Structures are given as structure tokens and as C-alpha cells.
Image (spheres, rainbow, N blue to C red):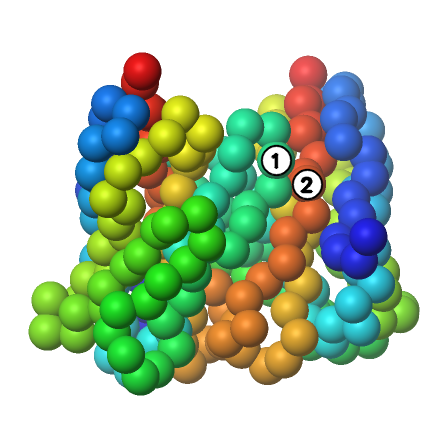
Amino acid sequence: AQSVTQLDSQVPVFEEAPVELRCNYSSSVSVYLFWYVQYPNQGLQLLLKYLSGSTLVKGINGFEAEFNKSQTSFHLRKPSVHISDTAEYFCAVSGATNKLIFGTGTLLAVQP
Amino acid sequence: NAGVTQTPKFRILKIGQSMTLQCAQDMNHNYMYWYRQDPGMGLKLIYYSVGAGITDKGEVPNGYNVSRSTTEDFPLRLELAAPSQTSVYFCASSYSRGSNYGYTFGSGTRLTVV
């Protein structure tokens, strides 16, 4: 069975600083990996996904993530955050079951 | 705009009441899903469907029922509401078997059971 761990429930950061949101997964089969963003009182929106190929994946709003198979990680990064990036970010994995399994989420709190 | 539409956006139920959360998509997606979101718990899969007439249980199906009579609609039924069902419910859909195209989510239904 697959599982996803997001160790940081909240990440405070100042505006224009870089940020990394951590995600580790567990799976015995090949996986697809995703990051979703949820703005307050809204549904989830796909940020980026890793299916195969290049391990560095670029998404919307300047975010990118790197798939590291040996460390079973898929950390999300942005070199310079804005106030508007304040949201909850979810890492998700799918594999043999073809269903998305979500992590518990990380609240990115960008401060001026 | 194309997407997943959920109604209602908010609802307060009394213990023991029943209700149906509506979900409709206009993207001709075969796969549809219901999740609940609780603080600090992420999203948990309640039920899913791989096509009209076919549904299956997810991680947390107890207390819920679903049906899928058309490709477009996937309603979620709560028969006897309990306080433990207070949550935000999200419906989602995807194009193919597997989620490699990503899911499209609705904007959610916030349900409070008192």
C-alpha cells in the first residue's frame, strides 16, 4: 500500500524568501506523485505532477519539485514566495491502486 | 466553465437527519471520487466510481452511500447524520484509469452536524 508523509504541518516564511515543503512517500511499486494547493475556502488545484522522465518537475506559479527515488521524496520548492502563496499544500501519491492517497497537508504561511 | 460542481456549499444538519450532497461534472470523465477533509488529517477517500453503474468503497465508507446512474452525476448520501460526519466534502473526477492526468476537484461542501 502507498502512503505519504508531510512532516511539517506549518511552514512560516517571509515574503521573497525561498521555501521547501517536504514530502516522503512509501510504495512497493512505481508511483505517480502530485502536489496540490488549496487556497482558503476553495477546492484543491493541481500544482505539478511527476509521472516519469526528468526528475525535476516544474509547475504553476513558479513552483518546482524533485523526485528522488533513493530517498523516496518529492519535495516542493519555490525560490521566492509571495503573500499570495499562502495556502495549504498537499502531496499525493498513486500507484497500483490507481487512487490518490493524500498527505496531511502543510500550511505555508507567508509573512510580509 | 467546465469542471466539477458541488451543491450545496454549506449545510447544517441535525443528528439523525439525512441529506444528499450533489456532484456533477461536464468533462466526460469516467472516474469520480468523494473525499472528506478534516483538520490535520488530509483527505480521506469515501467512495469512488469507475463509470456509470459501478461504485466501490474507499478508506472511510461507513455512514455513506453513493450511486452513479449517469457519467455526469455522482451524489453522496448520508442516511443518519452523526456529529462525526461534520467535515468538508470534496468531489473529484479524472479522465482515465489511474490519476496520471490529475484530478479535478469541486469547491467543496461544508457540513456541520449538530
Image: A99 above or below A104: below
Q: Label 2's element?
A: loop
Image: B13 above or below A71: above
| Residue tagged 1 | A42
Are there few (<14), some (14-19), or many (20+) residues within 10 Å of tag 2? many
In the drawing, does residue B2 fall left or right of residue A82?
A: right
Q: What residue appears at the point 80 percent right and 73 percent down from the top-left corner? A: B28
What amino acid is found at the position of numbered circle 2 in the picture?
Ser
In the drawing, does residue A3 fall left or right of residue A70?
A: right
What amino acid is found at the position of numbered circle 1 in the picture?
Gln
In the drawing, does residue B94 fall left or right of residue A37?
A: right
| Residue tagged 2 | B107
Q: What residue appears at the point 82 percent right and 39 percent down from the top-left corner? A: B7
Q: What residue appears at the point 51 percent right and 39 percent down from the top-left corner? A: A38
Image: A77 above or below A40: below
- Chain identity of mark 2: B
Q: Give the quadrant of the C terminus of chain B.
A: top right
Q: Give the percent coordinates (x, y) of residue B36.
A: 57, 43
Could you say which quadrant of the image residue A16 lies in? top left
Q: What residue appears at the point 60 percent right and 29 percent down from the top-left corner? A: A41
Decide if residue B75 is in sight here. Answer: no
Q: Give the percent coordinates (x, y) of residue B8.
A: 82, 34
- Chain identity of mark 1: A
Q: Are marks 2 and 1 in contact (CB under 8 Å)?
A: yes
Foreground of the two, B98 or B64:
B98
Could you say which quadrant of the image residue B11 lies in? top right
* Inter-mark Cα distance, 2 to 1: 5 Å
Q: Which mark is residue B112?
A: none
Foreground of the two, B26 or A93:
B26
Same subunit: marks 2 and 1: no
Q: Label 1's element?
A: loop
